[in-house]
Image (tube, rainbow, N blue to C red):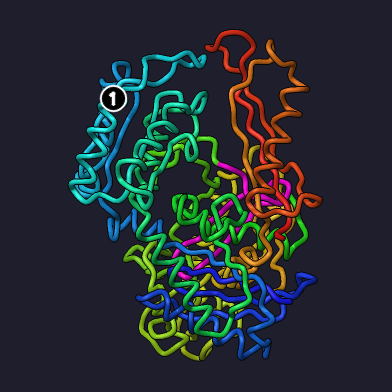
Amino acid sequence: MYKLGIDVGGTNTDAVLVDENRAVVADIKYPTSADIYDGILGAMRTVLEVSGVDPAQIHQAMLGTTQCTNAIVERKNLAPIGILRIGAPATTGIRPMVDWSEDIQKVAVGSTIIGGGFEYDGRELAPLDTAAAKAFFEEMKAKGVKSIAISCVFSTVRNDHEVEAAKLCREIMGEDVHISISSEIGSMGLIERENATILNAALWQVAERFTEGFAKSLRDEGIVNADVYLSQNDGTLMTMEHARRYPILTVACGPTNSIRGASYLSSLKDAIVVDVGGTTTDLGVIQNGFPRESSVAVTIGGVRTNFRMPDVISIGLGGGSIVRVRDDGSVTVGPDSVGYEITKKALVFGGDVMTATDIAVRLGMVELGDKSKVEAISQEVADKAMAAIRALVEDSVDAMKVSNADVDLILVGGGSIILPEKISGAASVLKPEHFGCANAIGSAISKVSGTYEKLMNYDELPREQSLEKAKKEAVELAVEAGAVRDTVEIIEMEDVPLAYYPGNTNRVKIKAAGDLN
């Protein structure tokens, strides 16, 4: 039995085959195409040819894709939606999408705020205005809208009104309507949670396209016995059905796949991962084998959200980064890059643009292309360029650390050939075997998770019992998502006292993960 992992990046589509013992059988890189499916198909065909594996022997296929991120950033293929907020009269001072730029505000065909919602302690703020909800859904149906975002004030404490509104929506707009409920997507904070829900609702067409496209690509290659999964941004997997319901959870899954792959390849559970691509370098932190989650609100394409995202720094440094010598003799590297055209434009490949890869070849760090083509680069220029590369990485490593102690660094990604072996602030620098396809490997070996988040009052139920109850709920959520019960373990746990709440109220968040069925 084999697992197929595919990760679609901006420069390359990586594919890897892993056997039942999690050993890497074959890994390849294939240029990403303008139409990503050509790239996915090409990567699949190549990895099957290289490995000689019978497609019928592949029982699990995993895809990591940047499609949802790109759709938000580029404002392309977003579906028209309706936005219902339950929170009048308390929340009418700030309208939905109030701080969004005009070009993305256009996704909303209509929005309204109706009576309902809850106080921070779970008391009802006002009864749900079902008449207003029905009128809004009827209006959206008449306008041909197929996707609705429902948010409610303090729905993370109680989601009764969201669930009731969703039921009404189905009755009026039909069973095939796509409904995004904020309590299932975001965390505390109405506006940011609502923003994430709106984006999720707008991404349903993108999600259908890439899930169906991936399934079709597999069938075309004779991979018909495989269960199909999508990578999500906490370093775990979700089913195709889950991905269609929550496409927003695929945003930033590329860096998390690399972090998981780096942890697996290096056998390190705690380290900083430096993932160097053709255009950018992503830095993330492994904690207990999983990506560290960001503790602050994250902005995606100019939209401020608060759903779970990995704590990642991206810098404009990659294998294709353009190197320039200024008039004063100083040397700069990036942030612009030749990207996927590196095999045409870099000096070592017969091009006329000096890139970070050319510097690495000139300094004898790697054998690539035609070395004679970079002999004209002076030692001084090469040394200055490498100093600039080193400084970019060292500053970013420092930004990811929580103390001044040295940490282990894992270098992955095809572009990591441009990085020096000695980096200050690092206790050790490791570049594991198969480092170039760590992202696809991370996709192939990922687990399935469940996250339970709730406000709990320890005066009503003591802390130990509350946490035990929350752990059981998290385990059940992981099993529901497809994990083998015996393999599920708690990988993350936090309880934060909330001083502004009555009694001994804490925000409890527990994540459990286990191996796939």
| Residue 424 is at least partly visible in this image | no
Q: Is residue 424 left or right of residue 327?
A: right
Q: Nearer the viewer, residue 1 or 503?
A: 1
- Residue 38 magenta-highlighted: no
Q: Measuring from the top left, give residue 3's x and y in whole percent.
A: 67, 73
Q: Nearer the viewer, residue 422 or 345?
A: 345
Task: Check disc 1 and report the residue beneath it.
Answer: 114
Q: Measuring from the top left, give residue 222's x and y in whole percent.
A: 57, 85
| Residue 466 is at least partly visible in this image | yes
SS under mark 1: strand
Q: Is residue 51 above or below residue 495?
A: below
Q: Nearer the viewer, residue 324 or 188?
A: 188
Q: Is residue 113 above or below residue 195?
A: above
Q: Nearer the viewer, residue 224 or 171?
A: 171
Q: Is residue 434 above or below residue 516?
A: below
Q: Residue at x 54, y 12 (%)?
A: 501
> Residues in magenta?
270-293
